[in-house]
Image (cartoon, rainbow, N blue to C red):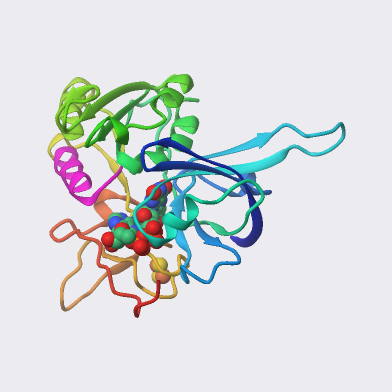
Amino acid sequence: MKNLKTIVLSNQEISPGYFRMKILAPGYSEASHPGQFVMFRVQRSLLPLLRRPFGIFRVGFMPADCDNMPAKEFIEIIYKVVGDGTGIMQGLHYGDPVELLGPLGTGFDCGVAAEEKILVGGGIGLVPLYSLAEKLVETSRVRLLMGGRTRDDIITVTEFERLGVETYVSTEDGSLGEAGLVTQVLERKLDQYPLATVFACGPMPMIEAVQEICLQHQVPLQVSLEGLMACGVGACLSCVVKGEGHTESDPRYLCTCTSGPVFAAEKLDWSKPEVKTINSGGCK
Ligand SMILES: Cc1cc2nc3c(=O)[nH]c(=O)nc-3n(C[C@H](O)[C@H](O)[C@H](O)COP(=O)(O)OP(=O)(O)OC[C@H]3O[C@@H](n4cnc5c(N)ncnc54)[C@H](O)[C@@H]3O)c2cc1C
Ligand code: FES
């Protein structure tokens, strides 16, 4: 993990409210693992004071400009504009200075080769699943179940298809793919592929429903949590969740930023799984 002062290479709106940003990031292809994230800060801007966490969508190389020059290594993040920080980010352009702290956290365990893998992405939860899919397709059959409220929430599906991933889209309003919840598709797929391993990232109600379904089907599940984070390195405790065996008298909190964001489902306490969000003292 290191703090990298770097620049934006591109920043484009790919669907209403969703942006894809390419950032120069030497060293990330060696250092990062699927499911890890970065803490992102806009340089030369006082606000927002705190860095914002974003999953790493993809790591890649741009061709060198001239002979004998090294290729430029980059990461891509995809973000939804929801508030102050992402509001500023949408206005960034090529060459704007930014800071990345990362790669951070514990990523996915790719599991046993050759077993069926089912990825479940809700909205922006799709982001950390792409680099996971890149890895998994080397050894396993991979299916992506992608859900959103409307067609605008369904992003980058064709890129998963280009990897050889079989994709299934559902939207709550029926504007793209099957009408309904992504968890309904998961139930059907687990009936068809009862030995699959499931990997999920999305809003907490979706994650809770996925956990219930995987428990009923007795299949292994890893979840990536996207709660609030202030520091990203285990110092502020703004990101804690309750771990397995947690009780009032024997509290077992886990930091999402260091023990996660990816957890094997059995490591968490699902009786009250909501991500505890301690207000970080009014900092923005
Ligand atoms: C490990 C991790 C990975 C993430 N990866 C991505 C990603 O790839 N793409 C992406 O768009 N977002 C991702 N997020 C969420 C992202 O960090 C927040 O959306 C971002 O910090 C919001 O910053 P803001 O200043 O624009 O919003 P703020 O002004 O801080 O908040 C605006 C509103 O959004 C709510 N909000 C803020 N953060 C979250 C959150 N994490 N979950 C739900 N609601 C939130 C606030 O409560 C508030 O109502 C990730 C979060 C974590 C912890
Ligand atoms: S975000 Fe500070 S401890 Fe996890």
The image quarter in which residue 112 lies: top left
Asked if 79 appears above or below 259 in the picture, the reply is above
The answer to which image quadrant residue 276 occupies is bottom left
Q: Measured from the top left, where is residue 4 in percent x and y?
A: 64, 59
Q: Quadrant of ligand 1?
A: bottom left
Labels in figure, total: 0
- Which residue is at the far right? 68
Q: Does the magenta run of residues contain 54?
A: no
Name the one closer to the observer, 70 or 273.
70
In magenta, the rendered stretch is 201-215
Q: Quadrant of residue 141?
A: top left
In the image, taking residue 179 as reference, residue 43 lies left or right, namely right
- Magenta-drawn stretch, dominant element (helix, strand or loop): helix
Quarter of the image for the C terminus: give it.
bottom left
Q: Which quarter of the figure is the N terminus placed in?
A: bottom right
Decide which of 277, 103 is in the foreground and name it: 277
Image coords of residue 12 (percent x, y): 51, 39
Can I make out residue 67 in this image?
A: yes
Image position of 151 (left or right of 133): left
x and y percentages locating residue 204 in the rendered image = 22, 51
Point 47% across, 57% down: residue: 88
The image shows residue 201, relative to residue 62, as above or below, that is below
Residue at image coords 15%, 34%: 217
Residue 195 horizontal side relative to residue 272, left or right:
right
With respect to residue 55, does 238 lie above or below?
below
Which residue is found at the position 44% from the left and 31% from the top?
Answer: 133
Answer yes or no: is residue 261 visible: no
Where is residue 208 shown, x and y percent of the image? 18, 48
Q: Residue at x 38, y 65 (%)?
A: 229
